[in-house]
Image (cartoon, rainbow, N blue to C red):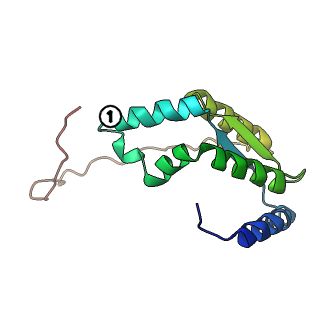
Amino acid sequence: MGFTTEDQVKRFMQVVPHLEGLIIESGVILLKYFLDVSENEQERRFRQRINDPVRQWKLSAMDLESYRRWWDYTKAYDEMIRATDSPHTPWWIVDSNDKKSARINCITHLLKSIPYERVEFDEPKLGKRQKRPDDYVADGIARNFVPRVF
């Protein structure tokens, strides 16, 4: 897209694995996901956005450019994966042609990737609620309620 020079991109690709290693060493769990979608599905979604006034705001100039430059983006994506995938911080590719299953699969993977220990729950006692005072009157207090539409 021309946001950076080729030298800046190369340097970034060299530095990222080292930076990620430092992050991992500090105790952070770092998971990297790439949501992958096919050419046909991308086109279907873009056409849906073009034809639906409620979704038109979702279609940006960057989206249109990514559509036109599919193979440039694919090449850049492949290079990024190749340069920044490592045993300590691998990329996880999520098939995102079906949004719902992509979300479920990604969230499931994320949750299974994080060590979890059940914390004991001490059930609290609510106790007894105090009695309404005989002298309580709500009149005269300004209250603005949202109208019920549902």
Of 84 and 138, nearer the camera is: 84
Q: Left or right: 47 with respect to 66? A: left
Do we see residue 140 in this rendering? Answer: yes
Up-down relation of residue 130 to residue 12 (above or below):
above
In the rendering, at what x and y percent does residue 51 appear? 33, 33
In the rendering, at what x and y percent does residue 63 appear? 49, 48
Of 105 and 118, nearer the camera is: 105
Mark 1 neighbour density, 10 Å: few (under 14) some (14–19) many (20 or more): few
Q: Quadrant location of residue 13?
A: bottom right
Of 20 and 84, nearer the camera is: 84
Up-down relation of residue 127 to residue 41 (above or below):
below
Q: Quadrant of the C terminus?
A: top left
| Residue pointed to by mark 1 | 52
Q: Quadrant of the N terminus?
A: bottom right
Q: Left or right: 138 with respect to 52? A: left
Residue drawn at point x = 59 percent, y = 65 percent: 2
Residue at the right extreme, as displayed: 87
Up-down relation of residue 79 to residue 6 (above or below):
above
Residue drawn at point x = 53 percent, y = 45 percent: 68
In the rendering, at what x and y percent does residue 81 appear? 78, 50
